Image (cartoon, grey):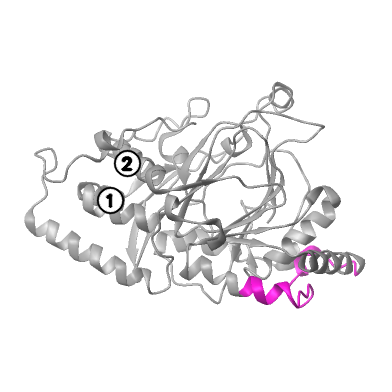
Amino acid sequence: MAPSRIDDSEILGDCNSDLIAVKDKELANLKARLSQHAVEIEQGMPRAWIGSELDEGQYLIVLTAEEKLEVELAARDYIASRRQISLLTPTSFPLPKLGPRIRLEREQLSDGLGFIIVRGLKPSEYDSHMNIVLYAGISSYIGNKRAIQFPGGPVLSHVIDLSSDEDREKHRGKWIGTSNQNSALPFHTDNGHILCLYSIHSVPNGGRSRLASAQKVLETLYRERPDLIGILKDDWEWDTFAKIPTGFNRPLLFEEHDRTILSYQRRPLIGLSDFPRRAGLKPLTNKQIEALDVLEALASRFGLTFELKTGDILYVNNLALLHGREAFKCEHLNGCRRHLLRMFLKDEESEFPLPGPLDAVVRGMYEHDVEEEEFPWSLAPVPYILSP
């Protein structure tokens, strides 16, 4: 569902107005908490940033011709060894030149901007198997654990445009996820530590990626709308969209282990017109809806919008950044359509304790037998199921 346009001046209001009754003592506590944020950001969390102030040289890693050749040779050697992709590691996928560079740049994910882009691959030059091996091989230098994306599912999934009339007819009776449609995606987070997307084919009209610093959003929220902090920290009722209708309660904002984490998705909280939440769940209050709109407004205000070009690999700290996407025109040119490969990684070297409700979900995604990992080249939509 495309986010509605929101006037910041209307939604953010004025903390000194009569509409927001916050006691002086509470404001003092909030200011102290905001001051503490600045310290926390220096202690292992990406810093707050404003998209308009960034230069792509701060997050873009462009492969040299030598590094591209090195990656391609490593992929061909690995394929020739006939080992399964799930056993791929930096040891079995040696990159003596590019590897150290990737290892150094991955610090951006935990201590810098919270994201990086690797540019220089040419997906059209490789077959499907080699594209997966290249992607998994480079990604092994970012994180040493790969997540299963839904119970019993693969570690690799495809974000592909299935919005044409032909696709809708082919998948009649199945709900096609918003990520597989051409409508805009509002800002949100996913489950998992590191989101990574490999662009097999981009589109010329629209579909630009959007990122926003959760720390910047929260810093502003504490100053401009402190009345919403408690609402975000309260339990919200989520839908799982499982075959057996269930729901669970979880906050959107966590302040534990000396870190602040914003974790939410709009669809499980408000549903969609063509795929509503189950009838037994309570509708959101006006204040909860306002809180979601404020988060969207702030993320749009401070976020970065950029083109994820064909061949780019995007790595995002999912615990520190919000992400979204612009709408795009459905164009299947020369048999090609917008197509990305998606994985969720974890770097155990930079891992930190998560709040209990998040830890229960995220930990299970990475606890599995590596040899059972699947890397399918399947263009069918995957199930959308959330775990409590």
Q: Nearer the viewer, residue 288 or 31?
A: 31
Q: Is residue 262 visible?
A: no
Residue 55 x %, y %: 51, 56
Q: Quadrant of residue 11?
A: top left
- Check the image and report above or below for 324 versus 331: below
Q: Earlier in the sequence, mark 1 or mark 2?
A: 1
List the residue tagged with mark 1.
221
Q: Are marks 1 and 2 in contact (CB under 8 Å)?
A: yes
Q: Is residue 11 magenta?
A: no
List the residue tagged with mark 2.
294
* Residue that appears at 61% across and 63% down: 345
Residue 114 x %, y %: 49, 62
* Residue that appears at 19% across and 59% down: 30
CA gap, disc 1 to disc 2? Answer: 8 Å
- Looking at the image, residue 314 sits to the left or right of residue 26; the answer is right
Q: Hey, what amino acid is under mark 2?
A: Val
Residue 176 x %, y %: 62, 33
Helix, strand or loop: magenta stretch: loop
Q: Nearer the viewer, residue 248 or 73?
A: 73
Say which element carries label 1: helix
